[in-house]
Image (spheres, helix red, strand yellow):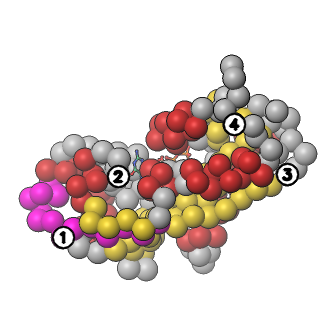
Amino acid sequence: MSELILASTSSARRALMDGLGLAYRAEAPGVDEVVSPSVSVTDAVRELAARKARAVHQRHPAAWVLGADQLVEVGGEVLSKPEDRSAAREQLRKLVGNTHAIHTGVCLLGPGGQVHEAVETARLTFYAVTAEELERYLDLNEWEGCCGSYRVEEAGQALLERLEGDRANVQGLPMTTVVRLLRRAGFPFFERR
Ligand SMILES: Nc1nc2c(ncn2[C@@H]2O[C@H](COP(=O)(O)OP(=O)(O)OP(=O)(O)O)[C@@H](O)[C@H]2O)c(=O)[nH]1
């Protein structure tokens, strides 16, 4: 099977792929993540995942390349990664006591131009916590590098009242879907090394 490359700088995405046990390596996509504001949030993550995969696939056309992109949607607003603590505070204020959607686009490009792609959505409801509790959570710095300013697999799970969907999707890769795409592409699992 051709080499598998994860077109990502995300440590959370690497951790999820490590768990799968397939041989792969990661490479930064190096693309700008700007899309037209007129594009729907699901089309935006689909396009950006494909853009990241294409950028790495152009450098390694004989490989399989997996790209992903994630955005949060709440009250009609789209959130990505916060620039700083105050931006993270603003994001979390919108999420607490509310239900938001996390959309993740994934795109798997193959050596012969094969394309397998999907967009997965999870819905999360957060407890209505006090401003003081929110400051304590911000002090943990879990907001850094995270779309929506929280980490569902770490202390941020204490904000989570209800989750509908794939928990791995919230972390950065909807692994149920990633496995489906990899199986469609013919990847063998549980190979003896
Ligand atoms: N650990 C963790 N990371 C999260 C969580 N929610 C979102 N993220 C991260 O937030 C980031 C979403 O932003 P993206 O623009 O899709 O990805 P990125 O971080 O720029 O990384 P690239 O794949 O290189 O584009 C990803 O790195 C996700 O792994 C979470 O609950 N836990």
Q: Distance between the residues labelled 1 and 3?
A: 45 Å
Secondary structure category for the residue under label 4: loop
Q: Is residue 124 visible?
A: yes
Residue 67 position (above or below residue 97):
above
Residue 152's disc number: 2
Q: Is residue 130 magenta?
A: yes
Q: Residue at x 79, y 47 (%)?
A: 185
Task: Examine the structure image and report whether residue 11 is included in the region drawn in magenta.
Answer: no
Crowding near the residue tagged with mark 3, few <14, some 14–19, many ≥20 C-alpha atoms within 10 Å: few
Residue picked out by circle 3? 114
Is 146 on the left-hand or right-hand side of 120?
left
Distance CA(mark 4)–CA(mark 1): 42 Å
Q: What stretch is highlighted in magenta?
A: 122-135
Q: Residues within 10 Å of mark 1 (few under 14, many from 20)?
A: some
Q: Looking at the image, tell me whether mark 4 or mark 1 is earlier in sequence order.
A: 1
**Residue under pointer 1:** 128
**Identity, as a three-letter code, of the amino acid under mark 4:** Phe
Image height of 108 relative to 27, above or below: below
Task: Give the residue drawn at x 66%, y 32%.
Answer: 190
